[in-house]
Amino acid sequence: MATGRTHRPASRSRGIPEATVARLPLYLRALTALSERSVPTVSSEELAAAAGVNSAKLRKDFSYLGSYGTRGVGYDVEYLVYQISRELGLTQDWPVVIVGIGNLGHALANYGGFASRGFRVAALIDADPSATGKITAGLPVRHTDELETIIRENQVSIGVIATPAGAAQEVCERLVAAGVTSILNFAPTVLSVPDGVDVRKVDLSIELQILAFHEQRKSGEEALAAAAEAADADGPGTRGKPEKSQKATPLAAPAKAAKAAVKAAVARKTGRSGPDGEVPAVMPA
Amino acid sequence: MATGRTHRPASRSRGIPEATVARLPLYLRALTALSERSVPTVSSEELAAAAGVNSAKLRKDFSYLGSYGTRGVGYDVEYLVYQISRELGLTQDWPVVIVGIGNLGHALANYGGFASRGFRVAALIDADPSATGKITAGLPVRHTDELETIIRENQVSIGVIATPAGAAQEVCERLVAAGVTSILNFAPTVLSVPDGVDVRKVDLSIELQILAFHEQRKSGEEALAAAAEAADADGPGTRGKPEKSQKATPLAAPAKAAKAAVKAAVARKTGRSGPDGEVPAVMPA
DNA sequence: CCATCTTTGTGCACGCGTTCACAAAGGCAT
DNA sequence: ATGCCTTTGTGAACGCGTGCACAAAGATGG
Ligand SMILES: NC(=O)c1ccc[n+]([C@@H]2O[C@H](COP(=O)([O-])OP(=O)(O)OC[C@H]3O[C@@H](n4cnc5c(N)ncnc54)[C@H](O)[C@@H]3O)[C@@H](O)[C@H]2O)c1
Ligand SMILES: NC(=O)c1ccc[n+]([C@@H]2O[C@H](COP(=O)([O-])OP(=O)(O)OC[C@H]3O[C@@H](n4cnc5c(N)ncnc54)[C@H](O)[C@@H]3O)[C@@H](O)[C@H]2O)c1
């Protein structure tokens, strides 16, 4: 998955837990697929399998919405699709603006997954004058100067930021000032927004780093230390070859000496990638 | 944010909680910025603000890694960058393949955020014969036939899926069979993988739906019901104008009659978007 | 109309994550 | 050296989310 919400701690809005809200779109997707296959009803067990969750969790989630199932039978697919759509606010049309029509912005603009869920791209906005006017995904790219006007005229309340990180906060502020109250941020920055504005972020880099963490664990604890030391000294061939780890005090209180040593090594490395022989990642006390 | 992990419930690998792992990249980014400004040390308070989290949380997170701070002073920036990088496995090089070079795949291939964190795009793979061979972001697009060879030769353990949803599971299986053990999935599907394989998903559509949910709450509970009914009947002008909510029995047990009525209405609507006068979203008992 | 069987809805317990609050640690000035 | 002041590291309390397990509901067949 990508990431979690940023602000507003955990205010379960009127009884529906945030974790449940995050799963509703998942259920909806599975239900839509069933609906297209004209399946009339589905049990919690089947639907849970399709959505990749626990069936008890699914039933509890639905219980927050009301009693929409029939014991002994299951849930009526069409009815549930409607109820979830309504709960998520997908029965109305949400105009969205995308700001920053670069690599990612182009992909987003061409993405079909918007319209299929009630989200309508109202405008594409970019600061580059040479980009404005170009037709992208059937829409002309508008200049940033028009941002406020576009937001107001189209009653846009959801904005997508796909600008470089440096511009994100500024763009965010302009969006908010113009009336946007929900932001989906693709730039790798922490956005600060006033209360009442929701920010969700999608950060590819973070996802990869989390995967790398687990990947590293899979190859054994110590490979990393070896790799870290050997990184600039030798070529390939060392990977995945542990060296016998003294797992005692794995990360326990490094003495001052150790800190200083590593710090020095790091400094050396940062400055220029010179050879460094002894870099004790874990130091004996 | 994008999304959460899919499989492997909550196995805190060797003591570091999953929630903490997910925040380490955030800290790392903030620390890198400080490092570039040559800031020598930083307090938990400052760093927490930069990363957008609570300072107590940050300190506790760091405590899982070891005692890396100095009381009365704070944390040494360079040292912490090194420790977190090491913990996340970023001191080694991670070759990555991107499968599905369409709109999104192109954007990903051109994304600079990979290399800056130790992720190297080893290959771009697509099934479309007319696409193969084309140079994208400095790399030739390779045909799916070569997938297994590419994975093995480059020792790739992380795969990114950016194909249409229908192809995702199949691609996933081929990746896993070839040796990939971590997958970042952009296709809106639930992937099933064997134990030991990590899947994280990024789903733009889900993020927007979650935003829509909260957005809807902001405009008052009932606007939705009104909008739902009026959706195909009238034009703009109704939005964001609450009408005084009768919050009694918001979603309480609808009687059989109500279910049937709504279901009928839904069916009507699904078939063709004809006019529907009375669609009781919430029915009096 | 009754028995049986399926499946929902939920009470309950448990574990993870968050946050508070504070003692201990260490730097720094005197 | 001594005391002060800042900031870490963590014990403890709390709340949310998850999953088990089961009683009640309802459909279905006889
Ligand atoms: N490309 C990806 O796959 C990818 C993946 C994850 C995250 N991101 C992030 O998404 C953002 C965009 O990535 P990209 O690859 O599309 O970059 P890009 O440089 O191709 O596009 C950025 C666009 O934003 C425009 N822009 C700059 N400042 C602006 C401003 N103040 N107002 C409006 N528009 C402005 C630029 O003109 C440009 O068209 C970056 O922050 C990047 O880190 C990209
Ligand atoms: N474009 C976006 O902004 C965006 C956003 C979120 C999610 N997504 C999802 O990402 C995926 C890709 O989106 P897109 O807009 O790039 O679609 P796209 O149709 O432009 O690209 C898909 C690419 O995958 C290739 N492909 C198809 N089957 C394949 C296979 N079996 N093996 C290898 N390659 C195969 C196609 O040739 C094509 O080049 C979709 O699942 C989409 O739902 C896209």
Image (tube, coloured by chain):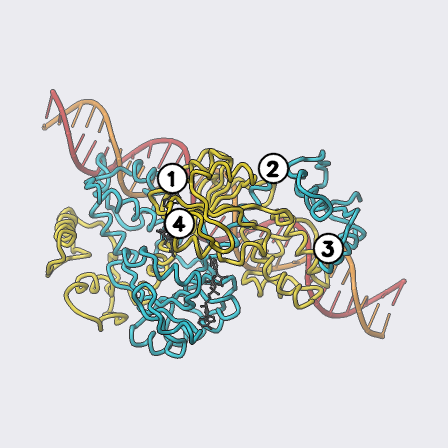
Chain colours: A cyan, B yellow, C orange, D red
User: Given the image, on which type of amino acid does mark 4 rest?
Assistant: Ala
Q: Are marks 1 and 2 on the same chain?
A: no
Q: Which chain hosts label 1?
A: B
Of mark 3 and mark 2, the one earlier in the sequence is 2
Of badges 1 and 2, the one in the foreground is 1
Q: Which residue position is annotated with label 2?
A: A219
Q: Which residue position is annotated with label 3?
A: A273
Report crowding for label 1: few under 14, some 14 to 19, many 20 or more residues within 10 A (C-alpha): many
Mark 3 and mark 2: span between their CA atoms?
26 Å
Q: Are marks 1 and 3 in contact (CB under 8 Å)?
A: no
Q: Nearer the viewer, residue A41 or B167?
A: B167
Identity of the residue drawn at 69% across and 67% down:
B38
Q: Nearer the viewer, residue B284 or B194?
A: B194
Q: Which residue position is annotated with label 1?
A: B169
**Relative vertical location of residue B72 with respect to residue C1 in this rendering, above or below:** below
Q: Are marks 3 and 4 in contact (CB under 8 Å)?
A: no
Q: Secondary structure at mark 2?
A: loop
Q: Which residue position is annotated with label 4?
A: B131
